[in-house]
Amino acid sequence: MDVRLAMTGFGNVGRGVAELLANHREEYQARYGVRLLLTGVADRRGAVVDAGGLNEVELIRNKQELGSVSGQTAGAGRPADEAFLIDSRADVLIEAASTNFEDAEPGWSLIKSALNLELDVVLASKGALVLYYSQLMTLAATRGKTVSHSATVGAPLPVLDVINRTLVGTRILGFEGVLNSTSNVILQAMTDGKSYDEGVRLAQEMGIAETDPTLDVDGWDAAAKAAIVANAAFGSSLGIADVSREGIRTVPAAEIEAAARQGEALKLVSMGSLREGEVVAEVRVVRRSRSHPLGRLRGSEMGVLIHADPLGDFTATVENLGASGGIATASTVLRDVLNLASRRGWNSDRRS
Amino acid sequence: MDVRLAMTGFGNVGRGVAELLANHREEYQARYGVRLLLTGVADRRGAVVDAGGLNEVELIRNKQELGSVSGQTAGAGRPADEAFLIDSRADVLIEAASTNFEDAEPGWSLIKSALNLELDVVLASKGALVLYYSQLMTLAATRGKTVSHSATVGAPLPVLDVINRTLVGTRILGFEGVLNSTSNVILQAMTDGKSYDEGVRLAQEMGIAETDPTLDVDGWDAAAKAAIVANAAFGSSLGIADVSREGIRTVPAAEIEAAARQGEALKLVSMGSLREGEVVAEVRVVRRSRSHPLGRLRGSEMGVLIHADPLGDFTATVENLGASGGIATASTVLRDVLNLASRRGWNSDRRS
């Protein structure tokens, strides 16, 4: 059957979703039994809607040439509001706008509208998840809808899928993850004798760091991920404010050199564990030896180590794809959509 | 609701399943909404059945003290046949007997009976899967039943789950895995200057190698896993006979030494790829540098590297738990059961 997708945000991830749909729609349909249609897309300047399916190639061209998917100058597109969701006849809202850790808007309002309209939600942005976790999940449960968010942590590394799906039946005791590539590229550069500023420039050249790397280097992004992974692992409801946090700006070069001399590496690590029944999540700059699964990671690799009973220590690592990471994250978003379609039986349903 | 399990085999894995159920039944019920009951168990000497639920502690004691779960001397227990499945009122057959690569019996006959009786099947043994793959899957599809087998490859490493679940929506280009611990412990020992025989003894002391390590050191086990992973990754129907195979018995010590001098390690690797549209699966002894994700693995660690588009290179590794690996494999079996229960909606159904 047809599955209609409304999407907000058309940066690397949103454009990646459009590209994957344009190039692989028939393949997904053959393999998973659903035809995925993008029926509403919004960026900062405005939204476009076509319940029969928008043309992704046109969206990408409009964004590139006119600065907005809506093909309009500022303010001329329709707003991304409840009517946008209704007119697009969407089954799923994909929220892929930039993460906002202040108030998670405008995503948060639209997510609430979507759940109230009984859409399922797939998140690539982290704001709503770490500012309003309990509210979000309660609303979804009340409406019988799901909030998937595999792409919010270390995509393309499937950390949340591993926890939610492959570790079913095991008890997670703790985790630690190198989940913010920008910080770790900078730390690696400093280990190699470069300055902090040179490290930032390198990460930017690799297409990993934003122009303003504050959210990365001050540990906000890593803290959001620590909360999200802890909630998946332990069933807690932590927000970003519950995560004790440090960044890498204040790490003395001498400390990095001393670690390197001893064959160790400093890593910005998101971690979580149970201490006396309490879930503790934190972000710390820690030393890891080269024989440690995280200490082995090169600059732009990501990884997570999960201690589980009776599984033992499970490690998953993935290379960071730099500027092409958008397409990998987009693929993770579509993975959530396809898994949702399978859970809802949309792939066996004959209605179209 | 109650989910009734019939199980054949009561070695490390079967006993592990019984232990996990005895210790965690209430926890599974609280977390997953199903009460798992072992209602039929068979070992070589005979079977016992109680549709109301067998006592796992008693089964373990009977096996230990009398040599059989049936508590009987040889031949006195009832056979593990169709009547065994019917009388146990099982929803699921768990096949956890020793793998037999000759004719996969007696498991294969019982698996066919189970599917014909419309039970789902969870496999921990590899025989039927690599000797009769097409027949098995066709029969299951005809009956609308599923054959899960996460425990057959590198459990506790969730290779198949990663492919089937977390890589949904990506295209797998190839894989290589260190999936037979015995061979790799022996190769590691030889790298450290020990003889082949000393390596075998070490693997046996660690509780990893069988008394007769033939299936491991001649590459049969690794070849079975190559076929199983290839079938999951590429949708092929390979059997063990389709896998070109080498073992480690004939690797010259000089070659291992030469590799070690260059900082490289020899590994017995199960691999698969697409070559001109054909699925190729093989087992080879290959050199891997210490910076390669598989070259980094210590003796008893297992790992798999998956090349996927657009995910990039994904690596998962896990420590081998030695003698306690039975419980990790058992946990993987129950993971399959719990995922099956969720897919079938048994956890939301109110019947009991």
Image: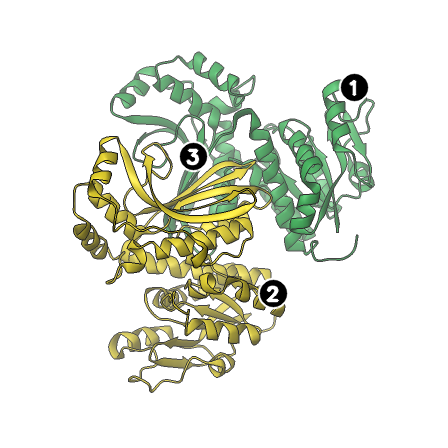
Chain colours: A yellow, B green
Q: With respect to residue B178, does B315 lie above or below?
A: below
Quadrant of image for the N terminus of chain A: bottom right
Disc 1 and disc 3: Cα gap in Å?
41 Å
Q: Residue at x 24, y 49 (%)?
A: A186
Position of residue B218 in the picture relative to residue B13 (left or right): left
Disc 2 packing (10 Å; few <14; some 14–19; many ≥20): few
Which residue is the site of mark 1? B74
- Local SS, label 3: strand
Taking the view exactly as shown, the residue that stands out farthest to the bottom is A76
- Numbered label attached to residue B282: 3
Indicate the chain on which mark 3 is placed: B
Which residue is the site of mark 2? A141
Amino acid type assigned to the residue bearing label 3 in the image: Glu
Amino acid type assigned to the residue bearing label 1 in the image: Ala
Looking at the image, can residue A172 be seen? yes
Res B256 quadrant in image: top left
Lower sequence index among marks 1 and 3 = 1
Disc 1 and disc 2: Cα gap in Å?
54 Å
Indicate the chain on which mark 1 is placed: B
Looking at the image, can residue B146 be seen? no
Q: With respect to residue B324, does A242 lie above or below?
A: below
Indicate the chain on which mark 2 is placed: A
Instruction: Using the image as rendered, state which of residue B310 and residue A264 is in the foreground.
Output: A264
- Local SS, label 1: loop
Quadrant of image for the C terminus of chain A: bottom right
Q: Residue at x 32, y 43 (%)?
A: A267
Q: With respect to residue B43, does A212 lie above or below?
A: below
The x and y percentages for residue B59 are: 75, 28
Amino acid type assigned to the residue bearing label 2 in the image: Ala
Disc 3 packing (10 Å; few <14; some 14–19; many ≥20): many
Position of residue A274 in the picture relative to residue B316 (left or right): right
The x and y percentages for residue A137 are: 55, 63
